[in-house]
Amino acid sequence: MKSFVLSVALLFAFNSVPAKAQSTDAELVQQVIQSAYIDGFANLVDISAMERGFHPSFEVLRLKDGNVEKTPIAHWIAGAKKRVENAAGAAPQIIYTGKYLQLDVTGSVAVSKLEVYKSDKLAYTDYLSLYKFDEGWRIVSKVSHSH
């Protein structure tokens, strides 16, 4: 009986380790999305945070007139830099927020379904894909629906 109880206890102990590791990865994924995308791109326009959180091969894929258009991260960063220049010292405004509808992490892959709100109005539903690299999680692609 003692060996049975010990076996069950060990089974639960070993099975709980991956869940804890995965929840930590999920938190790290959310941090990257918040710092690089929601704040880095949309709210604070933090180019350094964008470069840390988006992989250099990142692309936005957009369906337009039956064709898939690709926008690389370099184009996004250039647009963000122009917004910073046009703001000319104005204080950044936090107008975009994200609500996670789904977040799935399997090994070194993560996918997030995220509602993005602009001033409390639903603006986009984004699907973000991330990979875990040696330096951490990075966003590699985005598809989106505009509301």
Image: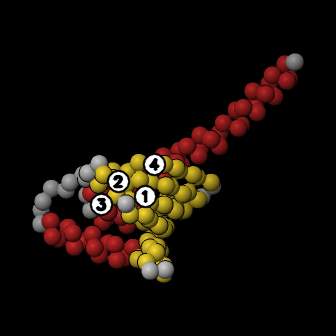
Quadrant assignment, res 10: top right
Q: Which of pointers 3 and 2 lies earlier in the amino acid sequence? A: 3
Q: Which mark is residue 100?
A: 4
Amino acid under label 2? Answer: Leu
Tags 2 and 1 in contact by the CB under 8 Å rule? Answer: yes
Residue 42's label in the rendered image is 3
The x, y position of residue 40, in whole percent, is 32, 60
Of marks 4 and 1, the one in the foreground: 1
Residue 102 image offset from top left, x and y in percent: 52, 50
Sequence-earlier tag: 4 or 1:
4
Give the total of numbered labels.
4
Whether residue 34 appears in this view of the structure is no
Mark nearer the viewer, 3 or 4: 4
Residue 125: image tag: 1
Q: Tag 1, which secondary structure?
A: strand
User: How far apart in space, not on screen, are marks 1 and 3 (Cα)?
Assistant: 15 Å
The one of 83 and 62 positioned closer to us in this rendering: 62
The residue shown at (76%, 33%) is 11
State the separation of the CA atoms marked 4 and 1: 10 Å
Q: CA distance from mark 2 to mark 1?
A: 8 Å
Disc nearest the viewer among 3 and 2: 2
In this rendering, does residue 3 appear at all? Answer: yes
Looking at the image, residue 24 lies above or below residue 83: above
* Separation of marks 3 and 4 at Cα, in angstroms: 17 Å
The kind of residue tagged 3 is: Ala
Q: Disc 1 marks which amino acid? A: Thr
